[in-house]
Image (cartoon, coloured by chain):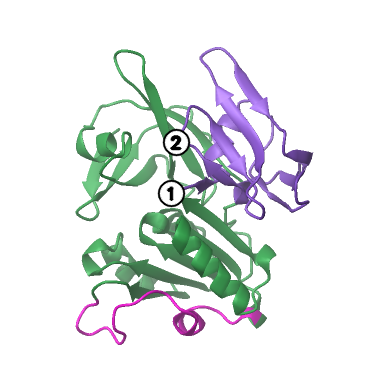
Chain colours: A green, B purple
């Protein structure tokens, strides 16, 4: 690990230098394995946040209260520490910069991480494919990458970002706090007639609900890719 | 009990399979549903990983990784289909 920077009160991005890293595709993940001095090992999967052309690997990790691995990564780990990584893994939840279809990204909480890798990769590759991100967060302070997303909406042509605040919204936000629903998704997403590729990532309940909304709006199931975490 | 999805199981399976397993399609032996591994429900807060069918909740496969061997139980899968380059 060569750098760690806080993103929110509970989330940090770890930058890793990985010898012989073969490169990754946007949306892939790695398994991080930790081994205690007594030989006890435990591992968790984390999405890669960095663009595919990066020489280092960024993992954005949310500390969860009883998380054996995450609480170490965001609370204890220091520059110079070494972890065992397996990956990059996955060919299902990936976006290729050569793709031409419009893309709808739907994120719940830290589910934004692999979607950010897609947004960053799109910019690095100079892709003009229209991207829309619908990002559901508890409140403004829980939004990961908020500053970078403001900059990218200004600079990356063809990127839109809409927030859904579930607990507390900023004063200038046009909607009261509430869950993602069909009306918000219809407004902030793409109509099904454009046959966008949809990527949905977040906690299991969020992903199931968002995927159901997309299917109900007419998006074919095979155009909806999902990644859930517990 | 919470579950994640087949993406979580892919790293361990790729020690056994030489291809990207998240795109491998399974057919459930119980209900006949077909989907990619990435769409299975994986329960992993246990000594091993258990993949269940999102349709009927039956066990598709179980994987236990020990220090020097792995056990892969495919009891609930009639076919695994892999895209090949």
Q: Position of residue A218 (x, y in %)?
A: 65, 78
Q: Is residue A110 magenta?
A: no
Residue on which disc 1 sits = A230
Instruction: Please tell me how many numbered marks the rendered image carries.
Output: 2
Magenta span of residues: A169-192
Asked if one can make out residue A136 in the rendered structure from this viewpoint, the answer is yes
Task: Kindly identify which chain the residue marked by label 1 belongs to.
Answer: A
Labels 1 & 2 near each other (Cβ < 8 A): yes
Task: Kindly identify which chain the residue marked by label 2 belongs to.
Answer: B
Q: Residue at x 56, y 30 (%)?
A: B12
Could you say whether the residue bearing mark 1 is in a helix, strand or loop?
A: loop
Q: What secondary structure characterizes most of the magenta part? A: loop
Give left or right: position of A10 versus A130: left
User: Label 1 to label 2, Cα distance in Å?
Assistant: 10 Å
Q: Nearer the viewer, residue A184 or A27?
A: A184
Q: Which mark is residue B45?
A: 2
Give left or right: position of B83 versus A26: right
Q: Kindly indicate whether the residues beneath marks 1 and 2 are on one polypeptide chain.
A: no
Give left or right: position of A16 versus A200: left
């Amino acid at each position: 690990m060569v750098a760690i920077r806080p993103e929110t009160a509970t989330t940090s991005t770890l930058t890793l230098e990985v010898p012989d890293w073969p490169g990754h595709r946007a949306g892939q993940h790695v398994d991080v394995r930790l081994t205690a001095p007594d030989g006890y090992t435990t591992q968790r999967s984390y999405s890669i946040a960095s663009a595919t052309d990066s020489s280092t690997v960024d993992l954005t990790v949310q500390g969860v209260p009883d998380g054996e691995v995450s609480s170490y990564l965001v609370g204890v780990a220091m520059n110079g520490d070494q972890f065992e990584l397996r990956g990059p893994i996955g060919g299902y939840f990936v976006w290729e910069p050569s793709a031409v279809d419009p893309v709808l990204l739907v994120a719940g909480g830290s589910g934004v991480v692999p979607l950010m890798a897609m947004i960053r990769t799109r910019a690095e590759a100079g892709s003009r494919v229209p991207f829309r991100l619908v990002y559901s967060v508890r409140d403004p302070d829980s939004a990961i990458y908020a500053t970078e997303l403001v900059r990218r909406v200004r600079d990356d042509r063809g990127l839109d970002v809409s927030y859904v605040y579930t607990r507390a919204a900023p004063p200038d936000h046009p909607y009261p706090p509430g869950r993602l629903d069909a009306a918000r998704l219809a407004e902030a997403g793409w109509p099904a007639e454009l046959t966008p590729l949809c990527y949905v990532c977040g906690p299991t309940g969020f992903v199931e609900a968002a995927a159901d909304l997309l299917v109900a709006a007419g998006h074919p199931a095979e155009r909806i890719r999902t990644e859930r975490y517990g | 009990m919470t579950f994640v999805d087949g993406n979580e199981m892919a790293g361990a399976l790729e020690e056994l399979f030489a291809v990207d397993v998240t795109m491998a399609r399974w057919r459930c032996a119980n209900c006949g549903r077909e989907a990619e591994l990435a769409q299975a429900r994986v329960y992993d807060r246990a000594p091993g990983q258990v993949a269940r069918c999102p349709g009927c909740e039956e066990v598709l496969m179980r994987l236990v990784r020990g220090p020097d061997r792995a056990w892969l139980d495919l009891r609930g899968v009639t076919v695994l289909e892999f895209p090949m380059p």
